[in-house]
Amino acid sequence: MRKVQLYIEGNRIELFNDEQIQVTSSIQNVQDISKTFTDFSQGFTVPASDVNNVFFEHWYNSDIDFTTDNNLRKDAYIEINLTTFRKGKVQLDGATLTNGKPSSYKLTFYGEGVTLKDTFGEDLLSDLDYTAYAHDFTAAEVLTRIEDANNTYDVKYPLITSYRVWEYQSQTITAQIPNTSTGTSTNNNIHANAGAITKTELFPAFRVAKIFEEIQNKYSIKFQGAFLQDERFTDLFLWYKGKEKFINISSAQTINFTTVTPTFTTYDLTNYVNTTEESIHVQYIDSNIINHVIRLNVTSVSSSDPYYIDVYQNGNLMNSIQGTSVQSFLLDIIQSVIGLDSVYTFKVRGQGANNIALNMRYEVTYFDSGNLFTDYVAIAASNVIYTSTVDLSSNAPVMKIADFFAGILKVFNMTVYSITDGEYWVEPLDDWYSKGGVVDVSEYVDVNTIEHARMPLYKKISFKYQDSECVLNKYFSQTFSKAYGDTTYQYNYDGGEFVVEVPFENLLQQKFTGTQLQVGYSLNAEFAPYIPKPVLLYQYKNKTCSFKFHNDGGSHSTVVDYTPFGQDLLYNNTDYTLNFAPETSTLLNYPIQNTLFANYYFSYLYNLYNLKQRLVSVKAKLPVSLLTGLQLNDRLVIRDRRYIINEMKTNLTTGDAELQLILDFRPIVNSTNPNPKVSTEGGSVKYLINLPNNAVQASFSCSDTDVTFSPNPMTASGSLTIGLPSGAAGTVYTIVVTYTYLDGSTTTETFYIIQ
């Protein structure tokens, strides 16, 4: 007999004896290959028992003052026979009253992947904490981050102009020059001192892996996955250009309250100011108060550069006010209404270095005996001091964290799933499938009711970036009648069209002839600066160059080495691209075949469009061990056929399962890992190791004893470093990986390194 239990925030919820709880599980569905899915349940009911009424606080009765907000989803997990089945969150959807008495509550269970989007909410990239990445905004510091031969910095400065049309000696931009431009100009020639690049022409780029780290820090979650350690991910950057032209604004500094001095006749407001949390708590006090007022006085500044006062209400930025000198500001007037309950905090940031002395005042205006009075508290504060440092927050592209995260998943066709609370695995779909086991479920399947359906295929699938206003992109699309980097695949089917569109812009670069110098132009067709959609960039290995850079003191430096940014990446002596199509590399001058489509989408689609492919539906009666142990990346064997799970609907109470399956024609191990290449001089290469489901260790061997592995063994998925000796071109090294499982069994996998 199966016993299903539901726990919400650690509290056991009583269930109806005959309640049927059905959970639908899917990761990527053939109906929409651009999205990853997670568990969700159909709505189910639980009794309005004494125990449940206490937990839900008699939610059906709106006269009760609730201590918790039941509009919010709550942490939950489901057990079957005391074994955890799924973790996620539960939403209270409603309650039913019968004959005036509560009879049941209606609930819906959601898996962790759904709740991750809820966690991000409406927060923007600018809301992340970039304190650890602040750096001096000096020419020397910017130049160091342009060169950075050792890949030291997480914030770098790509050579992309947002101000003028860079030229190189007699070479100008490869695009249609508008009539308003005169072509080459001495002041635009970056090979000469007169046209030297200045620090204010450049915007910073931030390593995407570090954005993921800051998301983890903000929401107290953890991302796992070997691919997140791979250079195809760690050498990816997001260009932080949220303005047309660069304006350096410092990190925001919190206004720190020191003392509070009340002046009052009726209302002592001292306790509404918190000198620990640096906040003012504005609440409804009584009906005599008309409004609340918050003021700020700047009494001295050390610089005439603009500064900005940011006003936050309940943690959300409500207003920003600009100042330049000594002056007084009315920050907010709040009407006194029943239910008023807001917490205000304040920050200051500015252009250039500054030392600002200020104080604040919180007051209430009220009627007493027909007369109008004002009581207030004077709030003394520490001086706000900030230096001329680069604050990524003020330059971040305007983008929701949820949209950024979903966009990165689309770029690499990644799935995200959770195994433990607050811990999410993020990895390309093929890598995830390669970790799955092979499970024979033939004995549990009703072989008499297997249905075969035609795969719902599309006649055209397109992979594209956001449209770009860049002059180079426009020239490319007009010349070749396609957008740069996008691709489309046509099929002879009657289905509709499907578009996989990422929320990023693919900024085309240009290399000057006869040089290794590649630059970009964030300029539109009229050569005017514009704000692009968020731009992803790969960094390549450093190249030699010769261009001029303007130093702070008025002198000029000749730059002879720099880090190119664009679509290209060199990894394990193999070139990769951020393009979906195998475009000719602007840096390397030949087509790059390792595209996003080829590496992360082709295998899955090839399996779907196989002429032998069918969408197979079966019914099964699964034992508890399979219900709780089966994972969505496991391959299922029914008789002599192998399948992957497209969707699984499970009745937890009865064990009845409806499986929608796809025939699997791919190799068991079919990861995005390419066979590495090493030069004839030898050296080291990286290889991603993904431990299969239930594996506890991977160990490595090679018949050539000069080959080394670090670490060896590995007890977690990650990046393996392989050291190889010098050898003749064409030498092939056979690497054997042995996986050890919880039950002591082993399997082996082989890959090759080519010299």
Image (spheres, rainbow, N blue to C red):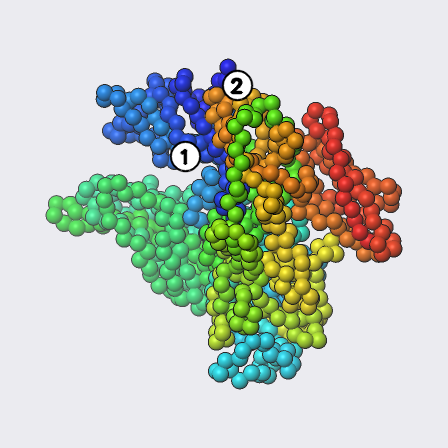
Structural distance between the alpha carbons of marks 1 and 2: 25 Å
Mark 1 — residue? 73
Nearer the observer, 364 or 396: 396
Q: Which one is in front, 690 or 453?
A: 453
* Residue placed furthest toward the top: 1
Q: Is residue 470 above or below residue 98?
A: below
Residue 124 visible to the viewer: yes
Residue type at numbered disc 1 = Arg
Residue drawn at 60 percent across, 38 percent down = 663
Percent from the top left, x then y, of residue 381?
41, 52
The amino acid type found where label 2 is placed reads Asn
Q: Position of residue 3 (x, y in %)?
A: 48, 18
Left/right of residue 89 with respect to residue 741 in the rendered view: left
Give the residue at x 57% y 23%: 444
The residue that disc 2 covers is: 81
Residue depicted at x 67% and y 63%: 591
Q: In this rendering, would 523 be left or right of 44?
A: right
Disc 1: CA contacts within 10 A as few (<14), some (14-19) or many (>=20): some
